[in-house]
Amino acid sequence: MITDFFSSMFGPITIYIRFSPQLIHIHYAEKNQTIEEKPIIALCDNKKKKRQVVAVGNESAKIQAQDPAKIQIYNAFKHPRTFLSHFELAEATLRYFICKIGSRKIMLRPIIILHPTENLQGGITQIEYKALIELGVSIGGRQVFVWTGRPLTNKELLDTAFLKKHCAEPPNNPL
């Protein structure tokens, strides 16, 4: 409720996330700013034997080169059958990029459009749709849309009526 008040006061924040196993494209529509990097995350064990993030994106490969025995690289968007292979790593990767492109204003719960670009043969399943919605909510989305068509323009991203009308609906429930 407070975030809706601030969003109405300062205007909405729209984050467009187009991803494949090779590249992640994060676009902050209101500022017309874009980041494109590899969707990888570098992890290492800390002193308590728990995994911690040490780098995300292109920086991950550089960090791993410094200590390849201790640092592992993961791509949460690479799987032969689906566009998400690991939910928590995808969440950590997207949170990092959203913070990198935005400012404190991103904390005001943005509108998020998730756009997978690979492994879409036959459309997305209900499970994939729900996973994307859950991913968008878990990274702070106030409203989350799923798009599976061509890349969206900045004008389309800023048009909430367009998003509501044209973004993917969950696959039909036969019940």
Image (cartoon, helix red, strand yellow):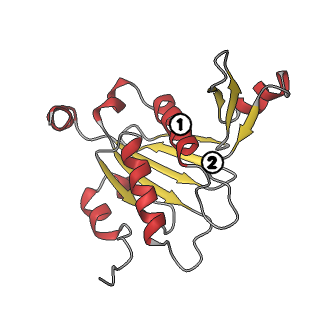
What is the quadrant of residue 166 in the picture? bottom left
Residue 76 — which label? 2
Vertical relation: 76 (above or below) 152: above
Asked if labels 2 and 1 touch by Cβ distance under 8 angstroms, the answer is: yes
Number of other residues with Cα within 10 Å of mark 2, as a class: few under 14, some 14 to 19, many 20 or more: many
What is the quadrant of residue 42 in the picture? top right
Q: Residue at x 53, y 35 (%)?
A: 97
| Distance (Cα) linking label 1 and label 2 | 9 Å
For this view, does 129 lie left or right of residue 109? right
Number of other residues with Cα within 10 Å of mark 1, as a class: few under 14, some 14 to 19, many 20 or more: some
Residue at the farthest top position: 47
For this view, does 86 lie left or right of residue 163? right
Q: Secondary structure at mark 1?
A: helix
Vertical relation: 167 (above or below) 132: below
Residue at the farthest front position: 48
Q: Give the x, y percent position of residue 121.
A: 59, 77
Q: Is residue 153 visible?
A: no
What is the quadrant of residue 170 in the picture? bottom left
Q: Give the x, y percent position of residue 29.
A: 39, 44
Q: Residue at x 33, y 30 (%)?
A: 107
Name the quarter where the C terminus is drawn.
Answer: bottom left
